[in-house]
Image (cartoon, coloured by chain):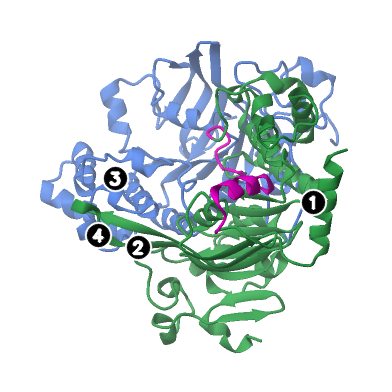
Amino acid sequence: MGDEGKDLRLLSVNNLAIAFATDEGVLRAVDDVSFHINRGESLGLVGESGCGKSVTALGLTRLIPSPPGRIAGGEVFFEGRDLLQVDPPELREVRGNEISMIFQEPLSALSPLHRIGRQMVEGIGFHRRMPQKQAWQYALSWLQKVGIPDAAGRMHAYPFQLSGGMQQRVMIAMALMLSPKLIIADEPTTALDVTTQAQIFGLIREMKQNETALLLITHDMGVVWEMCDRVIVMYASRIVESAELSELFNRPAHPYTRGLLEAIPGLARGRTHLKDIPGQVPSPLRYPSGCRFRDRCPHAFERCRTESPKLVECAAGHWAACFLAYPDAGEP
Amino acid sequence: MKTNSKDLAKAQWDAADTPLLEVSDLKTWFEVKRGMFSRKAGQIRAVDGVTFSLMANETIGLVGESGCGKTTLGRTLLGLEAATGGSVLFRGEPLLTFSHRRMKAMRRRLQVVFQDPLSSLNPRMNVMDIVTEGLLQFRMLTDSREVHAKRLLREVGLDEQMIYRFPHEFSGGQRQRINVARAISLRPDLVICDEAVSALDVSIQAQVINLLLLLQQRHHLSYLFISHDLSVVSNIADRIAVMYLGRIVEIGKTVDIIEKALHPYTRMLIAAIPVAGQKRVDQEMVTGETPSPAAPPNGCHFHPRCPEAMPVCRHAAPPEAWKNGHYVCCHMYRSNSD
């Protein structure tokens, strides 16, 4: 991908590789992953469990537990510096301040021992010079902004005293209150009811300022559809497809993406046979040679066995790693 | 074969036009105890007057948000929670008053598949022992355990060579297939699926849903399919029941619930679902959260969140209305009852 529009670009990930040492050998959780996020853009990273999407997100801010994990290679350029190279104090300055995260389980991301107000004030105090009282008021104003009723009272509550939806609102307030340039949200609504999820979508959209970018990690195409401008699909530690939202939904190029879109149960009128993807995701310890999807792919042919397909641009801004999507391949 | 006479008995049951399961005014309440001497501090009415019936070979989808009592309802039917009141007729027999022994015998006809495929399998038993344990218990082994196990694995789409493996050697989708194999091993009439596909990835979820549909056709099963996911439910259920704070607020044919929902809560649930490539969430229709089941609002439980709430909803319990097999419990439909 060229250098055009470089000032637009907030984050560039080049050839990221992350490995975990296990008893059974080295597990390559993220394998040669490259992508970028523009300022203000909402990018979805989708895939099934074990595909490496969450590990990719953790790797961006070097949150991989090490050992056993290890960033085995690549670059993560954020505003001109490689986050994989900066020293720890500088990295701490970036985390929470310029890049903030929202996790799936708010209860395990919040400290169970400290009241909500104190946790928020601590975060503000770390990144901003602000008197305690002012920081308290600032935190309170954010709890009000994310729609928590009786926010002043909730500042004194412990996380467990709030419902799951309210906890996630607190997480969103904490992630947004320092006006980060990038929010990484890892399955932010997966543990919530659909009605709560719908409200959280609205909240993130409303609160996210125009210049804030969002990297949304999810297994749910419905969530992507709701929240994202552009989508990256991962399968077996690699990116298999990336495109603008409507392009991906209307013209999926990779057989895996097509299968995934067809397998989603929509609102039906009764017993409906769903199109499934046969087989199962290969173990990351024993990936097949060539294309990692070939065992489940209805179109697999000899070349898929021997050669690994590269990500190629099959239409403007639409990239896919499938031989059938190569410009010289003709119609699949 | 021996099973023929049993299948015949079942066929006769189906021919009789009575429901397989009739639940009336079922209540499961929990006492909340607090402080010294375990003072009674209140009550959680997890299931509070639920009535519905399920025909042979029918699937009812039971949907609702977390804490609405759908899981407790399933557990009460299985005898895993004690009912506080009401009655349950299963094949015409009163299930709740059964002795321990008769309940055990009845379990052959009443099976369950839980959400977490790993924790519901004994890690120390191999697959053959897991799927044939029930057959052994009920003296239904007509062949060696090996033969039975292989047949069952084939039936749920697993490799029959895997019978000596242990649960941890399987993926999530395969484990759920093992759970399904165990559930159908006794040729039950009813399988209660409690969030049976919720923990699975989309591509695997579709496989297991298709398997459940296939087995239903083949063995004439009935399902009570409990899930928080209305889209999944709409692909498997013939009728859908929507639960809110311990009560069923609407039941109807799947197509009627999805396309012509009457209750404002059902409409809110549908509005909240993003359907990839088709519809976005209707943000304005979705508000509020479920109140605590320990202190449900007066009148209609849903009125604080309801966009249609009227003054009457605040103090009076909503009337029940039936029309063409479509049941709704809401003040807006009081005139429709027949």
Mark closer to the chain start, 2 or 1: 2
Residue type pointed to by label 1:
His
Q: Secondary structure at mark 1?
A: loop
Q: Disc 4 designates what residue?
A: A151
Q: Disc 2 designates what residue?
A: B43
Chain bearing tag 4 is A
Residue type pointed to by label 3:
Leu
Chain bearing tag 3 is A
In the rendered structure, the answer to whether residue A47 lies left or right of residue A302 reads left
Whether residue A105 is situated above or below residue B151 in the rendered picture: below
Residue A178 disc label: 3
Q: Quick one: label 3, few (<14), some, or many (20+) residues within 10 Å? A: some
Q: Gap between marks 3 and 2, in whole Å?
A: 43 Å
* Chain A on-screen colour: blue
Residue A16 percent coordinates (x, y): 51, 22
Q: Gap between marks 3 and 1, in whole Å?
A: 59 Å
Chain bearing tag 1 is B
